[in-house]
Image: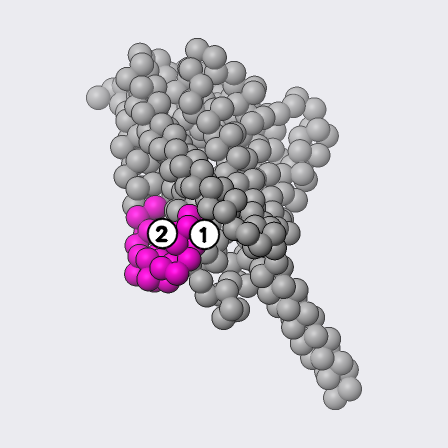
Amino acid sequence: MEETNKTARIQFFFRPFSADPKVQVVIFVAFLAMYLASLSGNAIIALTVQINHSLRTPMYFFLANLALLEISYTSSIAPLALANLLSMGKTPVSITGCGTQMFFFVFLGGADCVLLAVMASDRFVAICYPLRYTLIMSWPLCVGLVVGSLVLGFLLSLPLTILIFHLPFCNNNEIYHFYCDMPAVMRLACADTRVHQTALCIISFVVLSLPLSLISVSYIFIVAAVLQIRSEGGRHRAFSTCSSHVLVVLLQYGCTSFIYLSPSSSYSPEMGRVVSVVYTFITPILNPLIYSMRNKELKDALRKALRKFFVGWFYNLFKSEHM
């Protein structure tokens, strides 16, 4: 009981990237810029899909939900990371706060990975079974797949977070990271963590390897189907639609697999922190850029929405000045 109370009173701190305050400020500005770019880019994607009736299809429905997940996922990490950058790692976080951040990070990150697999399945049906696409990908099924992604992320995150934060934590309370990442937190425990590392490995395998296998199989069938299309324009449209999704998958799964599927003995805190920047700050920025640049329909819809917004803004400005 005494050890439990002692653990409950522990406050964690995050190790600064640099001992130089000027370097910390530069990193803060970079992180803030990336965070704001991620929020605005993903919000624009979600709003464009919502207001444009021509984009009311399963593919864009999944894309809008992915954008909302990216906003939530980044927001579970960025505010605390930014506060710690400014305070040179002196902003404390309670064990409850650390556990809450870890839960939402794993929950939203897991749902994100599952949703990418769902999007690959959607492209598989659209390209391999185009005549039955609307029948197979009904709206109740699409909603069920998004909800299922969230439920699976929740069910994987909750037991793992509870398991890790039942560990006793001793005097060392400095996390070698910029958020409460699982490997970094487990390194602070003053107990045997082999069971916890095994659980992390199993859950990482479920969240990463199984969806990635589904994505790989889907794209094997997609490539085979696209190569059978006689029209060069048809092949180009099909590959263009899928290439953006493949780029996002490679970024997301490549970085997370490096951290969570590598043996614990080879885990490097410094490398883990650097790679984590890619999938927590950089990837959420690239997702809207990749999808908007590689997808003509979305690009046109974005252009129309922005034109409509600026025309309306200038009209209202002109009207107010001449009243």
Magenta-drawn segment = 122-150
Q: Where residue 279 sits in the image (x, y, percent)?
A: 53, 35
Using the rendered view, name the quadrant where residue 163 is placed: top left
Q: Residue at x 47, y 12 (%)?
A: 266
Give the residue at mark 2.
Answer: 146
48 w.r.t. 273: above or below: below
Residue hosting label 1:
127
Q: Can residue 218 be seen by looking at this rendering?
A: yes
Up-down: is 125 above or below 210?
Answer: below
Mark 1 is on which residue type? Ile
Q: Is residue 129 magenta?
A: yes
Give 223 or 308, whichever is nearer the viewer.
223
* Residue at image coords 49%, 24%: 258
Horizontal arrangement in the rendering, residue 111 relative to residue 155 (left or right): right
Query: Is residue 71 found left or right of 192 in the rendered image?
Result: right
Q: Position of residue 311 (x, y in %)?
A: 70, 75
Name the dominant secondary structure of the magenta segment.
helix
Residue 195 lies left or right of residue 187; in this view the side is left
Colour option used: one colour
Q: State the count of labels.
A: 2
Q: CA distance from mark 1 to mark 2?
A: 21 Å
| Residue 231 place in picture, x, y as percent | 58, 54
